[in-house]
Amino acid sequence: MDTINQETNENGTNEGLNKTNSLEEFYAGSGILVTGATGFLGVALLEKLMRVCPRIAAIFILIRPKTNETIEQRFKKLIDDSIYGNIKAKHPSVLSKVYPVKGDVSLPDLGLSREDRNLLLEKVNIVFHSAATVRFNEPLDVAVRLNEPLDVAVNVNTKGTARVIELWSELKHPISFVHVSTAFSNANLHEIEEKVYTTSLKPSDVIDICDKFDKTSISVMEKRILKTYSNTYTFSKNLAEQIVASKYKDLPVAIVRPSIVGASLEEPCPGWIQGTSAFTGLVLLVSRGCATTIPARKDARLDVVPVDFVVDTIICTAWHVTLHHNLKVKVYNCTSNANPLKWGPMTDAVVKYSIEMPLNDTLWYPGCSVVANRYIYNVRSVIPHVLRAFIVDVFLRLRGSKPVMMELLKRGNRMFVSLQYFMLHEWTYQRDNCSDLVRKVKMLNDNDMVKLDLRDMNWEKYFATYLMGIRKFILKQEFMSTARQRLSRLYWIHQITEVSGIIILLWIILCLVH
């Protein structure tokens, strides 16, 4: 790290920033710190910064060591990802400017060594804070429990943010700080403005209780919180926003609130996705035929944003807030509100393309109904699903394969229960700051390198791309012609099962009557 470009020392309070004509020029010579760089959004952000801003002086990424993996091993695994292939081909020198730093947002002083902390204070100008603990990201092979224990969520999401921005405030040459929150940080409201909302419980009080009280007292407070807020994740993100807004309101600090972050639209390549997050897991379950009924409202808005759209917003926000900040922390609602998608058309698109280009391991003929009534959903999701799961598992056993359908059904139901609040409600987001960002970026020479407007988004094509990405990046599959033959067989099995189900139901009714 001793060879890091010395330009990072000079870029902090550069008055010439106001004359910047391009994003690339704004980032040239800057030192950047990224937290959460090994996560889905962090990987995409890192890739874009390296690809379009090759004159960046240095990018430091905070990496938490794991029990069986050092930060060097995690860093190598990160950089070896195929999405960095284009960078290695066109800007190989940029990779030498990326430095892993051992740290953990859940620890005091971020778990940094004195040497590393001093290095960051000297070399970093811009901080992107995207690290968080979020149960939306649990993979399908883990029992989905959206509600992280309150003390864990507060320590990582709230106190972790306070630790990172405290570091930024001590930088010798700070430029801007971007905190990545969530559009659901105020899910208890229906209309959400681009401002920070307060809670009845002060962040400092919640932190004190989590730090000093026993588990029983914390549990009592958590139950009280969950009467108003959907889960501890969104609540803890709200507290983090309050801390950022109260302490750093007169500085170039921004909060970006993305809604559901989905597969990429175009960059780093169409359909790029990592992990089976809650929404991606839902799409996969529908595509494989494992979810034929979901608890949602057909006409309710589903706010999804492609990951590259979120990354572009974050990158532009660091510039925008530097040049246009005022006495309030700027908030950017990074949502698809301007071109709303709804649950009904979404499931129709997923089913359509799952039939046109079936996955190699489809378990049932795809088809999905959207049901808002809880009782109807329970009836439609239990009896028919159990019958189908039983039939599929019998076939799998006869073939000598491991039965998986019943287990997938259970996990899917747990996931739907956890996400039901977000599937049955909708929100309206004010986007004045985002609109101003779009207008200002259009005046830059390199405005074509970012996409900030989703008003012309073709959602049906997007979900075709999404499914392609799931096949390629999650399942690691190549399309096989046998997949169509498999789907054809599943279609007839589905028809026979439906008819059999109707006959059995009529027989039961007949027996009850007589």
Image (cartoon, helix red, strand yellow):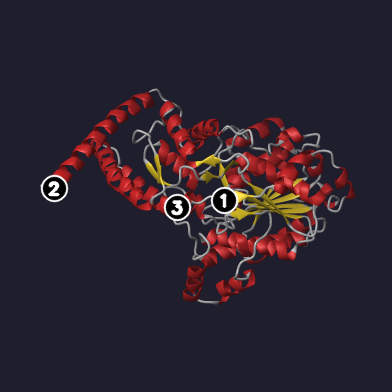
Where residue 322 appears, as percent x and y from the top left, is 80, 51
Figure disc tally: 3
Alpha-carbon distance for marks 3 and 2?
37 Å
What residue is rendered at 50% in x and 70% in y? Answer: 224
Where residue 442 appears, as percent x and y from the top left, is 77, 36
Alpha-carbon distance for marks 2 and 1?
47 Å
Disc 1 secondary structure class:
loop
Left or right, 423 with respect to 37, comes to: left
Disc 3 secondary structure class:
helix
N-terminal of the pair, mark 3 or mark 1, is 3
The dot on residue 427 is: 1
Mark 1 closeness class: few <14, some 14–19, many ≥20 residues within 10 Å: many
Name the residue carrying label 2: 513
Name the residue carrying label 3: 420
User: Is residue 434 at all visible to an observer of this figure?
Assistant: yes
User: Is residue 55 at all visible to an observer of this figure?
Assistant: no
What residue is rendered at 44% in x and 54% in y? Answer: 418
Left or right, 370 with respect to 237, comes to: left
Where residue 320 appears, as percent x and y from the top left, is 77, 47
The dot on residue 395 is: none
N-terminal of the pair, mark 3 or mark 2, is 3
Residue type of the residue flagged with mark 1: Trp
